[in-house]
Amino acid sequence: MPVPVPVPDLACGACYRRPMLLLPLVCGLAPAWFTADVVRTEGRWTADGSRIVTTATLRTSDGRELAVTQLGGHADGYTQVVWHDQAAFEPGLRVRVAAHQDGATWVADEVIDLETGVATPSVRTVTRKSGKPLYWAKSCAQVVRAAEGTSAIPGDGEQQVVLASMAVWNEDVASCSFLDLVDRGTETREVGRDFVNTIKFRDDRWCRPAVDDDPERCFNAQAAGVTTVTYIDEPTDERDGEIVDADVELNNVTFRITVNGQGTGSAPCAADLANTLVHELGHLLGLEHTCRGPMDPERVDHTGAAVPLCTATSDPVITEATMYPYQECGETKKATLSPDDIDAICRSHPLADDPGACEPPDDLSGGCCGAAPDPRASAALALLVAALVSGRRRRSALRR
C-alpha cells in the first residue's frame, strides 16, 4: 500500500489521508467531465420531503445547454447545503463538472468552482442567513442506532462501540457542559429530515438511496463518514440557529470499518470505528475542524485569531484534536478527546445554560415532532452535510 498522503480539497473536500479513489468506484458509473457556465438554477423538494434537489442549466464551452441535478439548494424558504461533497451550483459560476446519466437525468458526481478552485463550499458553523451560531436547545441530543448495524463487525460489536463513543463525549464534558448524547436504542430506519438523530452504516453502496422522484446520490469515496445537520435558518424566528436533526452515515464501502484492528470489509484502508465515530459525533454536536484545507477561505476562531492552513501548522492543540481533519489508515487517537474538543462544547453549551429538559426538539409545525414538517412551512430549515473531515476555522471554540 502506498504511503498515505493528504488528499487535497480539490478532489474531495477535506478527507482522510488515503490514496485517491476515482468516482466510478463510488457510483459504479463512468462520469463525463466538461467545463460550463451556470446559467440558471431551480430547486425543488423531493416528494417525501427529505431532500432538496437543484436542477442547473449549464452552458458548455461549445455552446450546448445541459440540465444537471445535484443535492442541495434553495426551495420554498429552505436551504440545503451539502458540505464537502460538491461546489453548489449558482448562476454566474464557471464550473468543471463530472456527471453521469440516470435515465434522462444528468446527475452531478463532482463540481469544481473554477473561480476559486474549491471543490466544496467552505465550512461555516453559523446559519446561512443571519450568521448566528448553531446550538441544541434541549439538554440532550437523542440518538437512534440503525438496527442492522454493519456486516464488517461480528455480532453486535459495532453497537457497543457506538455506545462507547457517545460515552466519550458525555463523560469528558460532564463537568462543564449540560449537553448529553442519549441513546434511544435500535430501530430499522433510513436517514432523513424526521427529527430523529440516526447513526447508519453503509455496507453495499456509499450512497444515499434513491427516493421516488430522485435517484441515488453517492458520496465522496475519501470520506469515511458524513454527518447531516438540519437547523432553523430564519432570522425572524426566535429559534434561529437551533439544530433539530442530525444523522451520521458510516462508510464500509471505500473504507474498511474495524474494531481493534479487525473488520471483514475488503477496502485496503482501515477506518477504526471509534476513531471515525467520535469525530462524527463532534459534528453532530456542532463542531467543525481545527485547521483549514488548502483551498478553504480564511476565517477566525473564537478569539479572532486566524485559523491556519493544516499544511502550515504543527501546533499539537490543532493536530492532536479529535476534530483535526486528517487521519491515517488504522489510526485510533481520535477515539479520545483533546482539551480543545472539550472546551468547544463547554463554550457552546455551558452548564449554566442548562434548559433542564432532555427531550426531542419542539415541533416546527405544531404536530408531533416525529413527523417531518411541510417544506412550505414558514420556519425555514437549512440542511448541512459535514463530511467526516473538512476544513474549519477554530482553535478551541465553536461557532455553530
Image (tube, grey):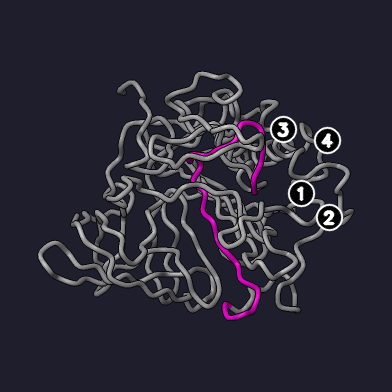
Q: Residues within 10 Å of mark 1 (few under 14, many from 20)?
A: some
Residue 342: mark in rendering: 3
| Viewer-side label of 3, 1 | 3
| Viewer-side label of 2, 4 | 4
Q: Nearer the viewer, residue 8 or 109?
A: 8
Query: Against 253, is 5 above or below?
Result: above
Decide: marks 1, 2 in contact (CB < 8 A)?
yes
Q: Amino acid at mark 2?
A: Cys
Decide: marks 3, 1 in contact (CB < 8 A)?
no
Which residue was labeled with disc 1? 182
Which residue was labeled with disc 2? 358
Q: Quick one: label 2 or label 3, which is nearer the N terminus?
A: 3
Q: Nearer the viewer, residue 97 or 157?
A: 97
Q: Is 98 placed left or right of 89 in the picture?
A: left
Instruction: Tell me the distance, in whole angstroms, between the alpha carbons under discs 2 and 4.
Output: 17 Å
Query: Against 132, is 167 above or below?
Result: above
Decide: marks 4, 1 in contact (CB < 8 A)?
no
